[in-house]
Structures are given as structure tokens and as C-alpha cells.
Amino acid sequence: MIRSGKFADKKILLIDKDPKNKNDRTWCFWETQPGFFEDIVYRKWDTISFLSDDFSATTNINPYKYKMIRGIDFYNYCFDEIKKNSGIEILNGSLSAGYSHKEGVTINVDDKTLHLDRAIVFNSIASMENKQPGEIKLLQHFKGWIVESPKPFFDPGIASIMDFRVHQDNGTTFAYTLPFSETKALVEYTLFTKTLLEKQQYDAGLKNYLTEFLKLEDYTISNTEFGVIPMTNRKFEFQNNGVFNIGTAGGQTKASSGYTFQFIQKQSKQIVDCLLKGQPLFTIADEPKRFRFYDNTLLHILYNNKLQGKKIFTDLFKKNKPQDVLRFLDNETSVKDELKIISSLPTWPFLKAAIKQF
């Protein structure tokens, strides 16, 4: 909205629980062109690797680049722009309740009650209350270490995005390595399961991966991160009781992979374009329903342990070009492309899971 230059006469209130002043996360995504946040891309790679017990490949993904943005760079960049605009107010506090009415919306933030008349309200707080019929939910949870080696060890030109050689005792589990230099990298331990692990289990998984698979014995840990992303077939509504839901709350987390960042950017552009044209926001079209169908089918298989996630993702990367897989995960493929990708997966488990979706 700021960059469009068309909202300088509007008052904007941004509410967040805490000030964003810590490097608490990283976002990874892929693009074929310089993107909206290209100025703060911390690292990018044009070569990725996929590893499993019976298949490994290192491939150039041109025209894509796999990109990473650090949380602190994102926060600093955005808030530096926000501070230049006197019409934007920032309020830190916990949103405890809210309701809409004919005149606008009333919300409570800590001990303050705010009446927002004739306001457009966006919400990014995802509520998982009131379970929907047939709803299933997995958690994508991960812990990462930024590790530093005293000697050159990493190949900074290759991002290892999935390594399934780690044990699968807890469910779908993989590690990935994003090298910043020959001596420094982010190493992440990731799981798709129904429940979280004990804290020490993430550390044990990371230690084992570093020593047993990467063969890195001598290292120090300079930073850590931890996160949980819901992977669910729940239907998130864009509009609900006069409030527009964005981000995960608006269904922008892809249920089958957990990727969110680029879907948020696409939705944000649609919203701003709609506001600039003076069109009602409810006219924004949903993603084609077939992509939700694919996601829910895979989610059903993983949730009910009908097939190992390790097997599914290995087949995807073994039998398809990585560019096709990335485009599929971005919901940007044609039906012809999708049929080819789906046919590379085990037929019977996916057919039975697909029937369940009806």
C-alpha cells in the first residue's frame, strides 16, 4: 500500500502483540524474477539438492532461484518504510476480543477498547477453535541452528532443501541445509506430525544430522530458531463477520507443504489492486479448487499413515523435473502438468485418499 503512493490520505492502524526486533525466523521461497522484497534477500541459490536413501540429485533450477529472507531484515525494512508515513500508527498489545457492527468494528487490545468506524479490518490471527466436520490437522514443526565451522566445509552454491536420510520414527522427517558461506549455514530439522517433540529431541536430531550425515564434528552454534506451522484441510474464509482474513488465517498456508510466504505476497497484491480500483474485496477470486483437493488428498495420506512422506517426496523429485515440482507447489501448473505429476505417485493410496475427499 505504501509503495503504491495512493494511500497517503488514509489512516492505518497496525496492531501486533510485540515489537518486531528479533531475528526469530527465516522465510524461504522460489522465484523466476526479482521479487517485491528482492532488496532484502539474504541469500539465493540456483542449484538445489534432494537426498533420500534410494535417490539423490543436485540440479540447477533455472529459471528459478531459491531465496531466503531473514526475519530481522524483513522487519527492519518494513518498519523503516512505515515510519516514514505519518498516517500509520503502530499499537503493540494482545487482541482479546472483537466484533463487527453496522458502523464498523470494535476491538479490545489489552485495556483499550477501539471503535473503528467505516474501517476495513484485516486479521492475520488464525483461530483453530470449533473443529469443522472431517477436519484433520498436522503440525509442521522445526528447529534450526546457524552453525559455523572453523574450516571451509559447505558449498555456498547449493541449497539442500530436503534430506530424508534421517530416521522416520516420528513420522515424515527431513533436514535441510542453507549455506551462507563455506564456513556458515542454517541447518534445520523438520517434521510433519500430529504432536510436537520434546525440546531435547530436536537438538538430538540436529546433532545426529550434523555428525552422521553431514560429517561435521567441529562447529559452533551462533543462533537458533523454532517454529510451528499448521497443515490442515480446514476451510479458512477470506471474509468473516465483516473482517478480512489474511496470511494463515486467510488460508494462505499450503496444506501439503507449509509454504506460506509467496502465497501471502500474491494475496496482498490482489488486495491492494482491488482497493486501488475501488472494487469490493469479496470479488477477489479464490485459488482453483483443484489445488485444495490435491493438498487435502496428500494431507489425508500423511495424517493416516497410508504412505510415508519420504516415499511421496522422493517419487516427486525422482520422476519429475524440480522446476515442475516447484511450479506445482506454487499452484501455477496446468491440469496437463498436474496429471503428469500425479501419475508419478503411487496410484492406489492416492486414489483411495482422493475418493475420501468427496
Image: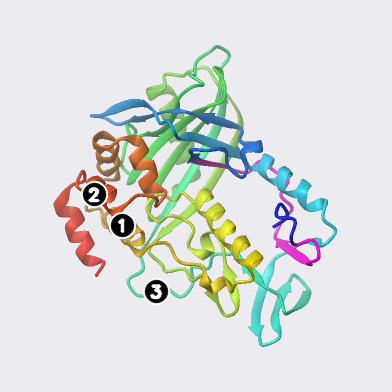
The residue segment tinted magenta is 7-29
Q: Is residue 231 above or below residue 226?
A: below
Disc with the residue nearer the chain's start (2 vs 3): 3
Residue 124 location in percent, x, y? 59, 63
Q: Main secondary structure of the magenta part?
A: loop
Q: Tell me the amino acid under the disc marked 3.
A: Gln
Q: Tell me the amino acid under the disc marked 2.
A: Ile
Give the image quarter of residue 44: top right
Residue 124 in view in this figure? no
Report which residue position mark 1 lands on: 294
Circles 3 and 1 in contact, beta carbons < 8 Å: no
Secondary structure at badge 3 equals: loop
The N terminus lies in quadrant: bottom right
Mark 3 crowd level (few <14, some 14–19, many ≥20, 10 Å Cα): few
Q: Residue 337, labelled with which disc?
A: none
Label 3 and label 1: CA atoms lie apart by 19 Å
Residue 345 location in percent, x, y? 21, 46
Report which residue position mark 2 lands on: 342
Circles 2 and 1 in contact, beta carbons < 8 Å: yes
Q: Is residue 205 above or below residue 249?
A: above
